[in-house]
Image (tube, rainbow, N blue to C red):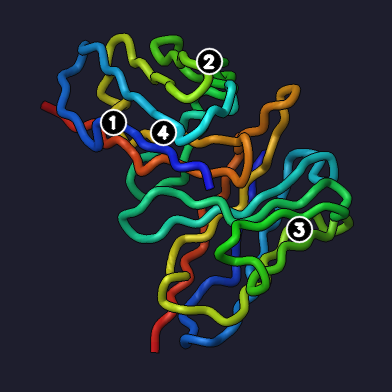
Amino acid sequence: DIQMTQSPSSLSASVGDRVTITCRASQIISSYLNWYQQKPGKAPKLLIYAASTLQSGVPSRFSGSGSGADFTLTISSLQPEDFATYYCQQSYTEWTFGQGTKVEIK
Amino acid sequence: EVQLVESGGGLVQPGGSLRLSCAASGFTFSSYWMSWVRQAPGKGPEWLANIKQDGSEKYYMDYVKGRFTISRDNAKNSLYLQMNSLSAEDTAIYYCAKTTPAGIYYYFDLWGRGTLVTVSS
């Protein structure tokens, strides 16, 4: 199985901060990488697919980059509604998710 | 409205069985792969299985192979998950998810609200 490792596991940030979350795959997965946002009691919501393509309707402050085994999700200016848990997910084979990164208010 | 609505969850004893359903509306269900994803309390999501548009191909996570069966009825716009030999480790919220391609890349772009399965004596 391909293991997905996110860092950090949690972070504290203020509104307006630039936030970066990384995701590393245990093997090369090209650009088969998606990012989701999840708020308490809700289902995950797709933000980014194919490593860097913004899903329709998602604010442009979210961006994704990377290829191969190392990927990054960046929020350029954190907004109050962005406090949530973020997951990466590989769709290369037997799709797996990272353990999550919780973004909390500082 | 475009939505997925899961049902069929509940409390089941270890070793028992449960059948989950997912009703789709607002999109052409028969045109999409569909998946089941679960999330145990305090954990990240875990993909379980997916099924091709016509049901001719099915894929499973190793841990549930032989215990869980995914199926669909396109005439009823419905997805199913038959779960057998359940254990406490299967306790989770179970989501169905529309599985959409962008070229060779797939992603889950529509999720239901989930149905809770609790395995306990």
Q: Amino acid at mark 3?
A: Ser
Residue denoted by label 2: A52
| Image location (x, y in percent) of residue A53 | 57, 15
Q: Residue at x 19, y 30 (%)?
A: A11
**Element under disc 4:** strand
Which numbered circle lies on residue A37? 4
| Image location (x, y in percent) of residue A37 | 41, 33
Which quadrant holds residue B31? top right
Separation of residues labelled 3 and 4 (CA atoms): 26 Å
Residue denoted by label 1: A7
Q: Is residue B58 left or right of residue B114?
A: right
Q: Are marks 1 and 3 in contact (CB under 8 Å)?
A: no
Q: Are marks 1 and 3 on the same chain?
A: no
Q: Nearer the viewer, residue B115 or A2?
A: A2
Which quadrant holds residue A95? top right
**Element under disc 1:** strand
Q: Are marks 2 and 1 in contact (CB under 8 Å)?
A: no
Question: Is residue B1 at least partly visible in the picture?
Answer: no
Q: Residue furthest left?
A: A106
The subunit carrying tag 2 is A
Q: How many numbered marks appear? A: 4
Q: Amino acid at mark 1?
A: Ser
Which numbered mark, 2 or 3, is in the foreground of this view?
Answer: 2
Which numbered mark, 3 or 4, is in the foreground of this view?
Answer: 4
Disc 2 crowd rating (10 Å Cα; few below 14, some 14-19, many 20+) is many
| Image location (x, y in percent) of residue B97 | 62, 46
Note whether B28 is above or below B46 in the view shown: above
Which numbered circle lies on residue B78? 3
Separation of residues labelled 2 and 4 (CA atoms): 15 Å
Separation of residues labelled 1 and 3 (CA atoms): 37 Å
**Element under disc 2:** loop
Q: Residue at x 75, y 44 (%)?
A: B33
